[in-house]
Amino acid sequence: MIHKCLFPVAGYGTRFLPATKSMPKEMLPIVNKPLVQYGVEEAIEAGMTTCAMVTGRGKRSIADHFDISYELEHQISGTGKEVYLDSIRNVLDKGIFTMVRQREMKGLGHAILTGEALIGSDPFGVVLSDDLCLNDGPGVLAQMAELYRQFRCSIVAIQEVPPEEVNKYGVIAGESLKDGLYRVDKMVEKPDPKDAPSNLAIIGRYILTPDIFDILRETPPGANGEVQLTDALQTQAQQGCVMAYRFQGRRFDCGSVPGFVEATNFVYENHYRRD
Ligand code: G1P
């Protein structure tokens, strides 16, 4: 039902300098797989096989990663090393990759609006690959796609965070419909903990209905002087319906060094195939 997923991957990754000086932060590996590939695999699992990347200067290695490396294929074809290409070959077999460049960094909302040309007028998923989400059962986007079938409106993934950390996130408040599912009536981007409407923080997984583009066009810059997706979603919640979903699974904040290290240890212990 939802076939496209948008990946805003134009950010600078300053917290990982100097590693990210000439290398996109989305290409940093969690063990042996770049962060962005985890997100792409999650989207493909949810049936979102067109992966639309909003890239920027210095991000060409992302486009190269989602293409055949002719030399590499030639070198290792027929050898015992082919197995190392299994996961990316699988992604390339199933996925279609489209790219557009965001010329100026004006916030997540602006990045999403830049992706409009790749998305068109259908509902779509969004993955912020800094947030690595792992689940033994269906992935977070697959869980959200299932909910979309029921509610046909925008959905944000949420997680409870310690109250003193709400200023790192978009925060929601709303009516609880059933355990873990809310109809949103308020959303604030990076609130001061004393003004936060709850400790339910938005995590980097969204399903958006395409009217979000017109709303974003009219959304003035908000927190940090940037066009915020959260502000546009707040308008959407007031005009119609936005749901918030507390997902099944674990989320690692790979935009921070401690979260990145935690994810690395977790994947190494639980998912890495040693040979
Ligand atoms: C973005 C969103 C924020 C959300 C967060 C999740 O913020 O603006 O609403 O809670 O991602 O990771 P950023 O982390 O880009 O500052």
Image (tube, rainbow, N blue to C red):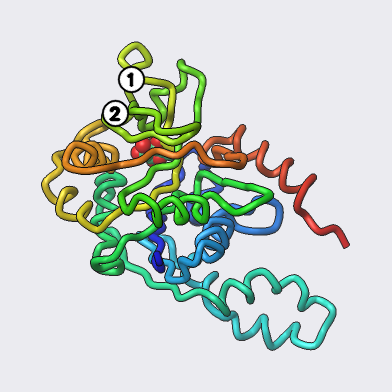
- Compared with 60, 18 (above or below) is above
Q: Quadrant of ligand 1?
A: top left
Picture coordinates of residue 270 (x, y %)? 77, 47
Picture coordinates of residue 123 (x, y %)? 31, 60
- Which amino acid, mark 2? Val
Describe the element under mark 2 as helix, strand or loop: strand
Decide if residue 9 is in sight here: yes
Describe the element under mark 1 as helix, strand or loop: loop
200 to the left or right of 261: left
The residue indicated by pointer 1 is 197
Taking the view exactly as shown, the residue that stands out farthest to the left is 218
- What residue is at 58 percent from the left and 57 percent from the top? 38
Given residues 184 and 108, the one toward you in this image is: 184
Give the number of the disc on residue 69.
Answer: none
Picture coordinates of residue 185 (x, y %)? 27, 30
Image quadrant in which you'd find residue 244:
top left
Taking the view exactly as shown, the residue that stands out farthest to the top is 194
- Compared with 76, 150 (above or below) is above
- What residue is at 39 percent from the left and 52 percent from the top? 150
- Which amino acid, mark 1? Pro
Decide if residue 227 is in sight here: no
Mark closest to the chain's N terminus, 2 or 1: 2
The residue indicated by pointer 2 is 188
Image quadrant in which you'd find residue 65:
bottom right
> How far apart, in angstroms, are the residues tagged by discs 2 and 1?
8 Å
- Compared with 143, 221 (above or below) is above
Given residues 22 and 82, the one toward you in this image is: 82
Q: Residues within 10 Å of mark 2 (few under 14, many from 20)?
A: many
Instruction: Classify the position of the C terminus by image quarter.
Output: bottom right
Query: Decide: marks 2, 1 in contact (CB < 8 A)?
Result: yes
Instruction: Classify the position of the N terminus by image quarter.
Output: bottom left
Picture coordinates of residue 158 (x, y %)? 45, 36
